Amino acid sequence: MANKYRKNLKRLWIFASSTLAHLDMLAAYTSWLIDGSCVLAALSPTAPSSFGHWPCAPVDFQLIGEPTGMAHPLSVVIGITGHRDLLTENTAHIERQFRELIGTLVRQYPDLTLRVITGLAEGADQLIAKTALALRMEGQPVQLVTVFPMPLTQYREDFHGVALEKFEALHAELMSFGLPVVELPAVSDRQQAYVNLGDYLLNKSDILVVIWDGNLSANHGALPKPGGTEHVTLQALEPLELLASTRGSADQLRNGINRYLHDVDTVPVYRIGTNRQSARAVDQHCGYIISANSEGISVTDQPPAHTTEHLRELNRSSKALAEKRESQGYWPCDDLPYYSGRSADLKSIADHFQRFDGLANAMQLKTARTHRAVAGLTLLLTSVFLFYAKILSVPLVLVGYVCLFMVSLLWYLWVKPNQTKFRYAFFRAISESLRIEFFWQALGLVDPQGNASLAQRLPAQGLNKRRTIVSLIKQASLGGDNAGALPIERRKVLHDWIAAQRAYYHKARHRLHERHTKIERVVTATICIPIILCVLLLSFYSFFKHTTLPGLELAWKDLIVFAIGWIPVIGAVLELHANNTSIKELHAQYQATERYLERVEDLMASPHAVDMGSAVLEVVGVELSREHMSWLATTERKAIVPAHGG
């Protein structure tokens, strides 16, 4: 009895030793995973704290006491353009089709509001504005935004008699509801003002609704009227063909080229066909336009696939913001009162940044917990297997192992750790893109129509989520004339943005280097210890010709099973080593980015910076956004794989 007791104690000692080795491996594995969720964030200026970061403060990160909350859900922005000379008998048809479109969007995307943008011109604009107000009064999640192509005092000159009375009455109604009204800056050419309004609609809209007769000027050998319904529609549908025929100013041409090169897809256009007083419609079909050419207009009831996926992602993001209202988020700058007091748009962008920063921080914590759970389950499964193999080889333990394996597998499929990690990277990319837009608008790089926004220059990287990030940048600000805004010191913006980000990259690189060194030591130990143990055990059999280990009665079978128990450890270490290789690559990238920002600082401090204007900061913003999008694309393609013990 005593021999059996001693034998079991010695077997238990072997099991405990192997478990300690597994724990050693787990310490390294978990250290990488916990740090990894923070290390990944270093691709964008993110603090390692689980609570988030002060985006512009290089040191002494502080926590905002108030939860972010989500005062308003995200929006689908619907731009409106249409003819002025509508027939009275067609208004009911137009209103019915618009209501059907709104109803469909509300049913499919219940967590979004619908932001309708209209210029409040005669005809289609005013009809849709009245319909949107009626839908709002009926309880539908519709927000009406009015955009005047010029200051109100000048815009009134486009209306006369009864038309002016209707305009004033509708404008007064909008003001009584406290709905936003945006005025674009005055220009000398009145037609250019309407071109600017068309640019605004294209730059801000997720869906463009056109009340259009479908007649093409090209069929009569003419060009569409700049700023007119046909012109805006073709800009959305065929930007390349319209670009080739552009005869506008150099700024118009540059904006058109920029929009075409950076926008991967066209703006989806929903047409409501109608007759007008001056022309009969080619047809009265309604739907999303597939093509518009000399052979006619082809429409479909279903939006393009990329639009559907984009709206679904917006809906998911809006729902996530509502569910994570208590998440801690921060501002894009530690001196927010300085900026928000100068522009309502800067305050709005900062609010959006704070919400998504808080959501990213919450997902970062969830990702870290998921990583720890994957590593813990790997250790538990391996330990149960070793317990069955070396301590208690009974069917009950084996059944427990199989059940535990199945439960772990179901948990893995339910939690979807790869999706969790991607959502974290996605929300972080959104917040960092909003940060760049914040500083660009603070510097005045984005014009009132939204031209030269990061939404037009965000690198695609072949990423499906780009359209959603672009949409969020668009809806974060209303634009318009900021002539009354307080001036902003360029040198202060430079310090708050470039200098602070460089300081962060420097800090993140050193932190990453220290953790990488620690992980390398653990990796080396977990590789060497099993090999040393195997060599020692084999030495007994080779030199002493023992079939069992003296004193432990360990047979060849036990040695083989013990070695099999170590296979998950070796696999986990190899996987860890591969991750460490990625850390080395990231370390080099951070170092390069730090040097890049340092050179930007030197350039902006030089006397030559005055001649370069804002071009340098535009280039820097695009380059930083490229890093964020590249990180997001890499995260989407890199799966979290449980260690081989499973």
Image: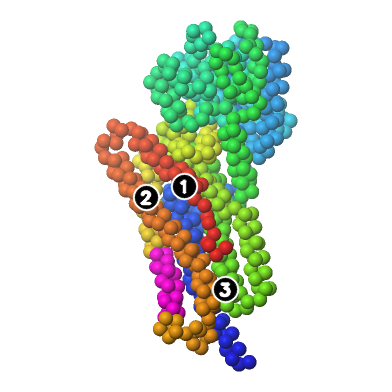
Q: Which mark is residue 386?
A: 3
Q: Residue at x 57, y 31 (%)?
A: 206
Farthest residue in the bottom direction? 2
Q: Magenta span has 36?
A: no
Q: Which residues are magenta?
A: 518-539
Q: Which mark is residue 634?
A: 1
Instruction: Give the mark toward the camera: 1 or 3.
Output: 3
Of callouts 1 and 3, the N-terminal one: 3
Of callouts 2 and 1, the N-terminal one: 2
Q: Which mark is residue 111?
A: none
What residue type is disc 3 on?
Leu
- The image shows residue 401 at horizontal and vertical percentages of 64, 68
Label 2, label 1: how far apart the Cα atoms are: 14 Å
Classify mark 2: helix, strand or loop.
helix
Classify mark 1: helix, strand or loop.
helix
What residue type is disc 1 on?
Thr
